[in-house]
Image (tube, rainbow, N blue to C red):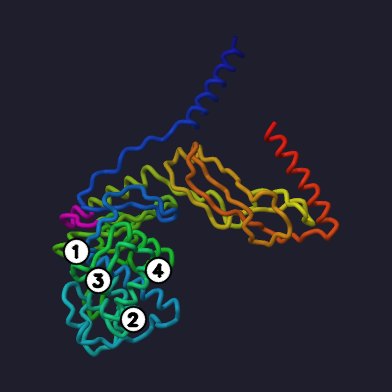
Amino acid sequence: MKKLKKNNLILSILFLAYALEAEESFIPDPPSLNSTSFILVDFATNRILAEKKPDEKMEPASITKLMTGYVVSDQISEGFISLNDEVVISENCRRKKGSRMFIVEGSKVLLLDLIKGMVIQSGNDASCAIAEHVAGSEENFVKLMMKYVESLGLNNTNFVNPTGWPDENHYSTAKDLAILSRNLIKSFPEHYSLYKQRSFTYNDIKQRNRNSLLWQDDSVDGLKTGHTEKAGHCLVSSASRNDTRLIAVTLNSSSEKNRLKDHRKILDYGFRYYRTKKLFLKGQNLREEQIWGGKQDTVKISPLEDLYLTLPVRDFRRVKSVFVLDNYIKAPVSEGQVVGKMLLKLDENEIGAVDLISLEDIDAKGFFGKVWSNIKLLVYRFLMEENSTS
C-alpha cells in the first residue's frame, strides 16, 4: 500500500510538472499612459512590448539632440573630428534661446564639454556649436542629419535643426526615436555613458540633468527629455534589470509629473512580465551534420550570431529549435559559409531565426572519391524519395 501511494505521488508530481511546462503564460494589457504616443521595446531583440500610435508624427522637441549626438559620435569614430577639438563659439550659437549651456561668444570650448552641455544640460547653444564644428553651419549639419535619418531607416522623421526648436516641418515618431536610441546605445556606448551623468558644471554654472528618472530609479541610465508648448512633455528612457534592457519613448505627456509616471509604469510593466535571454552563442558548436564528398564525414555548425529572445519568463520552457539545413551539404565547405537556418518556435509560431554556418574548412575528396560520393548521394536521394512516397 505504501509503495502504491509513493508511486501515485510520483505520478502526480510528474503530471503537475508536465502541466506547468505546457501551460501558457497570460499577462495583462499594458497600462494606460497619459502620453499621446508611446512605445516600449527590448534593446537586444527589438521586440515591441507595448505601443500606442507609434507611427504618429509629432514634434520631438529636445529629443532631437539624440540625433545630433549620434551624428557627432559617428563623425568622431570616423576620425573626422576629435573630442579634444577646441571649438570657437559663434555669435549665432551664443544667441540661441531656450535651455543653454551658457557658452561665451569668441571663446574656445572642448568638443567633449559641448557634448556634455548638450546631453546633460540640453543646451541649444551647445548643439549649435557642435553642428557648426561638424559641418560648418547648422544648415549643412541638418543635411548631414538627414543622411543619417535615411541610413537608419527612420521613415517618418524629418529634422530642420539640430536642437529641436519648434517647426511644423520638424517631426519624428515614437517608433523612429526608439530605433535611433537603440542604435545610439549599441554603436556608441562611450557617448551613451554621458546620459546617466546627473549634473554638469560649465562657466561656474552647475545644471542638473533634466531626466529626473535618474534619481528615482537606479536601473535607468538614459536618455533624453524634451518639452515645448506644442510637443508637450516628451522623454526617451532606457533601463537595465536582470540582464534585460528596455527602451521607452513617450511623446506629448501633459506635465513633467505625468511624463515620469508614464515611464515608471511602462518600464515596470516590461520588466515584470518579460525577460531577454541569450539562447545561443556565435561560434557555439551546436552539432555535427553529414557532408557529402568531403575529406571528413561531418561538419560542425554554429549560429552566425548570438541569438536572443524576449518572452514572458515561463514561456522559455516551451521554445523548440528546428534545424532547416541546405539539402545534402556538399564539400568543399568554407569556414563561415552559410549552410542553413535554425528556427525557434513557440508552439507552432516562429519567434526567431538565425543563419547556421560551418565552423571549419572541409576540402572535397579527389576526383574518384568525389564521383563515388555522388553515386552514394544519388542512391541516398532515391531511397529517401521512395520512403517519402510509400
Q: Which mark is residue 203?
A: none
Q: Nearer the viewer, mark 2 or mark 1?
A: 1
Which residue does the image show at 50% across and 32% down from the upper left? 21
| In-image side of 22 versus 174 (left or right) | right
Q: Write the residue at 20% across / 75% down.
A: 100
Q: For marks 1 and 4, give the CA distance.
A: 27 Å
For mark 1, what is the residue? 227
Q: CA distance from mark 4 to mark 2?
A: 25 Å
Position of residue 314 in the picture relative to residue 174 (left or right): right
Q: Nearer the viewer, residue 104 or 285?
A: 285
Name the quadrant containing residue 311.
Answer: top left
Q: Nearer the viewer, mark 1 or mark 4?
A: 4
Q: Nearer the viewer, residue 215 or 193?
A: 193
Would you place residue 41 above or below residue 130 in this image? Answer: above
> Is there CB contact under 8 Å for labels 3 and 2?
no
> Residue 293 in the image: x percent, y percent?
78, 54
Q: Earlier in the sequence, mark 1 or mark 4?
A: 4
- Left-right relation of 39 to 280: left
Q: Nearer the viewer, mark 1 or mark 3?
A: 1
Name which residue type carries label 2.
Answer: Leu
Q: In the image, which is nearer the foreground, mark 4 or mark 3?
A: 4
Mark sitting on residue 151? 4
Q: CA distance from mark 3 to mark 2?
A: 15 Å
Mark 2, residue position: 111
Tag 1–tag 4 contact (CB < 8 Å): no
Of the 4 image quadrants, the one containing the C terminus is top right
Could you say which disc has been placed on residue 121 in the image? Answer: 3
Region rendered in magenta: 251-260
Mark toward the start of the polypeptide (1 vs 3)? 3
User: Per the image, is 181 magenta?
Assistant: no
